[in-house]
Image (cartoon, rainbow, N blue to C red):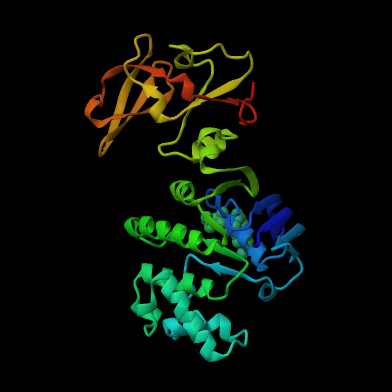
Amino acid sequence: MSGLTLAGVSAAYRDATVLHEVDLAARPGELLVVLGPSGAGKSTVLRVVAGLEPATTGRVHIAGRDVTDLRPGLRNVSMVFQSYALFPHLSVAENIAFGLEVRDVPRRTARERARAAAETVGCAGLLGRRPGQLSGGERQRVALARALVREPDVFLLDEPLSNLDLTLRVEMRAELRALHDRLGATMVHVTHDQTEALVLADRIAVLRDGRVEQVGTPEQIWRTPASTFVARFVGSPAMNLLPADAAVCRTGDAPPLPEQPLEVGFRPEAVTLDAAEGTPATVDRVEVIGEDAYAYLTLAAGHRVVARVPAARRPARDESVRVGVRWADAHLFHADSGRRYVP
Ligand SMILES: Nc1ncnc2c1ncn2[C@@H]1O[C@H](COP(=O)(O)OP(=O)(O)OP(=O)(O)O)[C@@H](O)[C@H]1O
């Protein structure tokens, strides 16, 4: 079984350093999701692992082997790109087998393995077609089959689902997870989509400006975000964050807070609108999504807060409400550093 580690890895494009001494590990058989906003350096992490960009500091190990100075072809990784990168003039079968034939696997063996890989990802019926004759979801399967056929130590998936429409994306991410579980493969999957990360990952590494902000299981990332950045990036609508001395943070069963600059975070579902001693607020707008409604509020002190309520009990626009916070679900952060406050 093969895992992956990056130890103190930096990378730069010309003079601009975009990864800053990143430590990251995918355990053997783990599906690690690298999550972060655009420009955080997610693709660069994969490119350094694949050997497409050099590490300016640090070492990369794959399956226990230091590959830092090896050229890409010797690293035994397969990369799946957002664009799929299929050869338009080759058939699906030829596309899948390509990586084997350039490695001198006999043609017949390559074709057999290509068929087996196509069966694994459910595109065996497409082997005779060209990429131009496939839907986006079918191309995605072919790209996966092409990665699979090489039996790599590690799969590197760079936003492989982001070109698919929402329905297909939801379907393919479940299939991808099932494929991972069947193969027991080590996978590093890059995405900026927090839902995708929460659904797919064994563990999530949140990347911000080329640094690892937090690594944890989806539950840890959700329940104990290490910083305001993680707290706001994971969850939609984003977690509310207010100065701890805001009136709403002093109402109801609010615990005494330490005397230092703190921010209080609470998700929309931790907000109540009918708290007897709550803070007065006005409803600016309401969005109904099926059974849920999101009420966007302005508190008397001018702070903005989002509340999730059952659609059937939603307030009306311009209505006055009394806002409370369920303290069991609140988070505390240092106001200056944004790091989680640990008493
Ligand atoms: N070939 C390049 N030359 C110069 N700068 C680059 C190059 N590729 C990426 N960058 C820069 O490096 C930083 C990290 O880019 P990277 O593509 O790794 O981010 P990302 O998190 O994958 O973003 P996205 O989600 O938008 O793909 C960005 O600031 C980007 O502008």
The residue at the far bottom in this view is: 107
Q: Quadrant of the N terminus?
A: bottom right
- The answer to whether 223 appears left or right of 22 in the picture is left
Horizontal and vertical percent for residue 315? 25, 24
Q: Where does the image place residue 270, in percent across and percent down from the top left?
A: 41, 25
Whether residue 222 can be seen here: yes
Q: Is residue 91 above or below residue 315?
A: below
Task: From this view, report whether residue 286 is shown above or below residue 19.
Answer: above
Within the displayed image, which quadrant is ligand 1 positioned in?
A: bottom right
Where is residue 237, by image quadrant?
top left
Residue 98 place in picture, x, y as percent? 53, 83
Give the quarter of the image for residue 75: bottom right
Q: Residue at x 46, y 12 (%)?
A: 253
Residue, far top: 277
State the residue at coordinates (41%, 72%).
139
Judged left or right of residue 8, residue 243 is left
x and y percentages locating residue 343 in the rendered image: 64, 21
Residue 72 versus residue 211 in the image, above or below: below
**At 38% from the left edge and 58% from the top edge, which residue is drawn?**
169
- Count of numbered badges drawn on the protein: 0
> Does residue 159 appear anywhere in the picture?
no
x 66%, y 59%: residue? 3
Residue 76 vs 323, above or below: the answer is: below
Quarter-of-image position of residue 42: bottom right
Is 183 or 312 nearer to us in this picture? 183
